[in-house]
Amino acid sequence: MPALVHDDLLRRAKDLDLPAVHHIDGVDEPGGGTAFAVVSPRDGQVLGEVADARPAEVDLSVAAARRAFDSGPWPRLAPADRGRILLRVAELLEEQRERLALTITLEMGKPITDAYEIELRAAINTFRWYGQLADKLTDESPYTSPDALALITREPAGVVGAVVPWNFPLTLASWKVAPALAAGCTVVLKPSENSPLSALLLGRIVTEAGLPPGVLNVVTGDGPVAGRAIGLHPDVDVLAFTGSTAVGRHFLRYAADSNLKRVWLELGGKSPNIILPDAPDLEKAAATAAWGIFFNQGEMCTAPSRLLVHSSVAERVTEAIVARAGELRVGDPLDPATEMGAMVGESHLERVLDHIGTGIEEGARLRAGGGRTLTETSGSYLRPTVFDHVDPGMRLAREEIFGPVLSVLTFDDLDEAVRLANATEYGLAAGLWTSDLSTAHRVSRALKAGTVWVNCYEEGDLTVPFGGMKQSGNGRDKSVHAIEKYTELKTTWIQL
């Protein structure tokens, strides 16, 4: 990140020109609806009023995407030409990196250092990767018999509705938008009402990069109105969603009640992080466990919120995490030195505090945090929180909290660790710390999770897929496998 100081960032944030209307068919579109306030969790101040989409605005955006798909140039461009435009999007994201990072920090409370170095890096790399992939996808021609030719072609699926959350607003939007565009689809993107500003900027950037009108449309509004309208729309062919399991169920119902559109879901998690006594570096394992649960204020679907640690090393590991929780710098997310910023808003903070209160009532031992901090700022700040003596039946161990709240559970043997790890409705991610190669392979195979990290956490790049099992969803983001969500396979059999 450029060498900036807190005062410089405060001044630049104050001077930001933030968008306020939808971006439909390549132009800014105010729509005819009302507007809603975007409140910054760093200080409770209103950042601005943003257009609140009704079904009419959703219809307008879907119609633009349908025209762009049915009669526009995008699906018919040579893949290399689509790729060049995606690469230009990556260049413009890099050019506007600071502006976008500041916007994300203001709208959802992420520390500016993380917004710039992690969130924007991921978004830029995603558009670049799929831009480079676009002309490297191939069809198939299996050998059948001398008197026939079989072709298996991959065609763009049509209009994609992408509904994304607030915790990584540009990263997760990029994970949906970039592969869909690379495949030749057109997209209607609806960001969370908590983080609409960065998505609106993305819409303007892709238009500037040369994307034809209607290929990417951004509409802002809440889930029960705008999200529902996208889910029920008969001209949306594919729905890609990241968010809660409860809302994912709604999208499946919307598909059943409309045109049976394909629905791809990346949902919640209650990820286990298993530390065995033979971990190659217990200090690193403890430090990574602390980083994983406190990073992004714990607002991550993959957060390692259940620490499963062998009883022989449990206290040593827990003490190290408690010490780190006490050292962590919670503060203004516009300060580059801040390590943990603000929760996304007051309602979410109250929800997390309710989980903490229930944990205490159910008999878990509070070892660190547990309450608000920086109340004088009028922002939504929570102290990093650690519980031990957590029973597997407690809410702390069962429900996704989506905050910086760690539950420590202990086990005495490997079979018990695997049982505890899999004793959840979720199956998004898991961690394992061991020096034994055989143990690493056997336990990784036994864990019901879409991603297993061994002796690390939250590592990877665009070459590997991301997604969950069980009630953590279906389908995969990232990698070449994401293209499968946005394409249809067609068989053509030619008798010679």
Image (tube, helix red, strand yellow):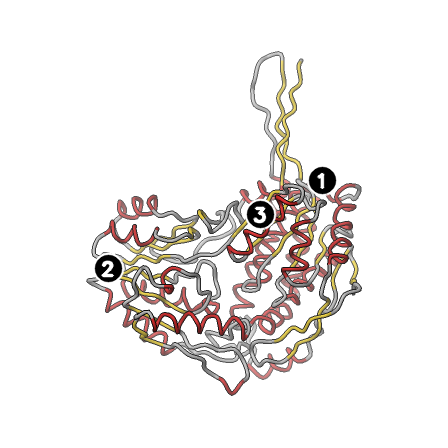
* Nearer-the-camera pick, 428 or 354: 354
Residue 483 higher or lower than 145, as above or below: below
Q: In the drawing, what numbered circle is on residue 346?
A: none
Between the residue at mark 3 and the residue at mark 1, the CA separation in whole angstroms equals 34 Å
Residue drawn at point x = 60 percent, y = 38 percent = 137
Determine whether the residue tagged by mark 2 lies in a helix, strand or loop.
strand
Q: In the drawing, what numbered circle is on residue 310?
A: 2
Residue 241 higher or lower than 193, as above or below: above
**Left or right: 225, with 300 as reference point:** right
Q: Nearer the viewer, mark 2 or mark 3?
A: 3
- The amino acid beneath tag 3 is Leu
Residue drawn at point x = 57 percent, y = 14 percent = 145
Residue 236 higher or lower than 2, as above or below: above
Mark nearer the N terminus (3 vs 1): 1
Q: Which residue is mark 1?
A: 78
Q: Nearer the viewer, mark 3 or mark 1?
A: 3
